Image (cartoon, grey):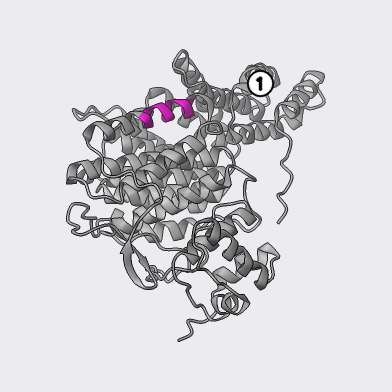
Amino acid sequence: MSRGPNTRLADHFALTGWSKGELARLVNRRGAALGEQQLSTDTSRVRRWIEQGEIPRDPVPRVLAAVFTERLGRVVTTEDLGLERHRPTRSGSTAPPPTEPGAPDRTAAVLTEFTGMDLMLNRRGLVGASAALAAGAMIADNLHDWLTGGAVAGAAARPGPRQVLTRGGPRPLIEAYDPGPVGPDEVAALERSVEVFRAWDASRGGGLQRKAVVGQLNEVGGLLTHHHPAALERRLWTVAANLAVLAGWMSHDVGLEPTAQRYFVIAAQAAREADDRPRAAEAVSRAARQMLHLGRADEALELMQLARAGTRPADGALPRTRAMLGTVEAWAHASLGRSEDTRRALGEAEALFVQDTDRPAPSWMQLFNEAELHGMQALVYRTLAEHDARAVPAAVHHARQAIRLRQRTGRERSALLDRITLASVHWIADEPDAALAEAGRALDSIHQTSSKRTWDRLREMHRLSARHQGLPAVAELRERIRAALPAPRAPRPI
């Protein structure tokens, strides 16, 4: 029976410029290269996939995802192509829904497929012409029930082999390279690798290590296709969540915005399998920070409301975690020019941060120290200063404190962002001499980073300096900024 047109597949197909016959030949050719010699796709089958919504048998969906990924220069999964059946989301949106609670097989399958496609791109091109961010409301809708106290994943109560759902029913999930189950020593080594990647990201930005993190996450996805003792499996899911957050943040750092967003959602889903609401909430807050960077403050607030709902003390959330989330919420309010709400959220964050606790912070929260708190406060007040000049003194104070505390910590990229924040505040306050000094220091170290996010902040500083461009020293600085920024990347041909 016809399912109706597959609009997702049709939309992707239209972007490629292929004919149906060309797509059929590509599927057969790629299938043969993968050892699937039996594929005999023709034009009529492609027409049925697109116009009637027919779902081909495995491995054709995976082959299709591979050829579309290569053509469009961005990660395209079988889910993106509408080649998997799902239940609708609560709101009835057409956004790809997440895994069902208690369905770790599906989470592992999504993780391994998405990372595998990402690695296959080998960083050719950045964002395809059709790539778009999902609305914050769609992400919030998909994760709402669990984070606000709904069903909890039961990772330890799943008998039987790992499976993936196909048109023909559940089938064992088999990879060409099957790493097999692991023990506590191997998981501990994976946990240490997360710390290494995290330190590198804080120091230099995500550009140089992103593929390594994605590769490690892909490997962990393979491990999660096997059963392990309950405690060990929860640790593996936590590793997956931590790596997915890093992959998302590094992708955001180099401008792969839709890819970053997918990693943040995968991270929240992995945290769900580990039954760790605070970890999931922090992943959601990363998606909110991404929205703020892209000028979508209303959607960021929606995400932060969800994140805050998942970090009640009863859920095991530490005061420091709640303080970190408060700074992101404050940034959203500041972006909207809401002075009172901004100051309230920052005041709550400060009060939570200083609360003592006997519980050690999880590894993913240890970088949110006093320097990071000041850095976020500086960024928030600098954002608010464009709407309310009374925020300038606080922005200057917190930026200076962050710079002082970050000295000799190995977090050069974070210190650079603080200097750009401080220079920007001085531009806003019409203090060109102070702005020139801080901007010069930032430019002296800009070559040490591979962070598009940093370059975007530098562009904002360049914009703010325009009001003083008649001064010779400012004109010279603006030329230095333009020289430091990378040349625009030419669009990748479709």
Residue drawn at point x = 39 percent, y = 39 percent: 243
For the residue pair 16 and 101, the one nearer the viewer reads as 16
Q: Could you tell me which quadrant the C terminus lies in?
A: bottom right
For the residue pair 200 and 180, the one nearer the viewer reads as 180
Q: Which residue is mark 1?
A: 443
- Residue 65 included in the magenta stretch of the image: no
Q: Tell me, yes or no, if residue 132 can be seen here.
A: yes
Q: Tell me, yes or no, if residue 280 can be seen here.
A: no
Q: Is residue 397 above or below residue 118?
A: above
Residue 283 locus on image (x, y percent)? 39, 44
Q: Amino acid at mark 1?
A: Leu
Residue drawn at point x = 23 percent, y = 56 percent: 152
For the residue pair 468 and 98, the one nearer the viewer reads as 98
Q: Is residue 143 above or below residue 23?
A: above
Give the quarter of the image for residue 161.
Answer: bottom left
Q: Is residue 468 above or below residue 301?
A: above
Give the quarter of the image for residue 113.
Answer: bottom left
Residue drawn at point x = 39 percent, y = 69 percent: 86
Residue drawn at point x = 48 percent, y = 24 percent: 398
> Seen from this angle, which residue lies furthest top?
408
Count numbered badges in the picture: 1
Residue 46 locus on image (x, y percent)? 59, 74
384 on left or right of 226? right
Residue 397 locus on image (x, y percent)? 50, 21
- Residue 194 included in the magenta stretch of the image: yes
Instruction: Report the magenta stretch's main SS.
Output: helix
Kindly state the secondary structure of the residue where label 1 is placed. helix
> What is the span of residues highlighted in magenta in the rendered image?
193-202
34 on left or right of 145? right
Please tell me how crowded label 1 is: few (under 14), some (14-19), or many (20+) other residues with Cα within 10 Å.
some
Q: Could you tell me which quadrant the N terminus lies in?
A: bottom left
380 on left or right of 16? left
